[in-house]
Structure formats: structure tokens, C-alpha cells
Image (spheres, grey):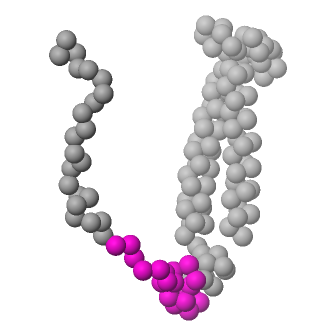
Amino acid sequence: MLTATIYTLLGFQVVVSFLIIITVLMQRPKSEGLGAAFGGGMTENLFGAQTTSVLATFTRWLGGTFLLLTLTLSVLYAKQSTTRSAIQQQLMNSPKAAVASSPGLAKPSAPPLAAPAPSAARSPARVPSAAPSAAGR
């Protein structure tokens, strides 16, 4: 039920988003920018002389609707993530298996490696290099 509500509200949010885009593009800016390219004068002929105030009011209402839908969807998504699915509930209620019985965690049959001999811990002896040094010339 919660998933169907989320998808329905998400569909409304997509529609509201497209309506916001369309109304913003239909508005006539003072500098005659993008609104004139999409027929800014046509909207005045179509909707009347008060197109600017009507479109601005409609944009405000759509913006408020978009904000409320976004907040509602975020609450519903948070509520959906806290509810456990049937599989999660079944896993939480099942008895825990013993850790030692799993084959991946069985003890190895080979003995552990021995520690290195103390003589190997000393620094290696210095070997003279075959190339003559620049200081000797």
C-alpha cells in the first residue's frame, strides 16, 4: 500500500515539474529573453492582458505543490525503509547457526609457519659495488 502511494505521488511530482517548466517558459521577462523565443506575445493574446500576474501566481502554486510533494515523498521513503520486509522478519526470527559449523571457518590442518631464524634478522653485509665511484677519480 505504501509503495503504491509513493509511486502515485511521484507521478504527480513529475507532472508538476513539467507544468513548472512550461509556465516559466511562457512567462514574459522584462528583457524579452527566452519568453519571446517561445512566443511570449502569443500568451497575452491567448490568456489576456493579465497573463504575467496569472502565470506568476500559477508558478507560485506549482512551486508550493512541488515542495509539499517532495517533503511528503521524503517522509514516505523514510517510513518505507524502516519497515522490515517479510524476508527480513523471517531472518531476524530464525535461530542463529553455530559459527564453527561453517566449512569456511574450519581450523586449518597445516601447522602454523615457524618464526624466522634470529640470524636473518641482522642487517645484510655490505657488498662492494663493481662500478668505480666518482669521488675516486
Q: Residue at x 60, y 34 (%)?
A: 60
Q: Is residue 98 above or below residue 76?
A: below
Start and end of the magenta stretch? 93-114
Horizontally, residue 99 falls left or right of residue 88, namely left
Quarter occupied by the N terminus: bottom right
Q: Quadrant of residue 82?
A: bottom right
Q: Is residue 49 above or below residue 85?
A: above
Q: Position of residue 64 (x, y in %)?
A: 58, 42
Q: Residue furthest left?
A: 135
Horizontally, residue 134 falls left or right of residue 70, namely left
Q: Quadrant of residue 115?
A: bottom left
Q: Position of residue 131 (x, y in %)?
A: 30, 23
In magenta stretch: residue 101: yes
Q: Residue at x 73, y 57 (%)?
A: 7
Q: Residue at x 55, y 62 (%)?
A: 78
Quarter occupied by the C terminus: top left
* Magenta region, main secondary structure: loop
Q: Quadrant of residue 35?
A: top right
Q: Position of residue 81 (x, y in %)?
A: 58, 66
In the image shown, does 136 or 94 lie closer to the viewer? 136
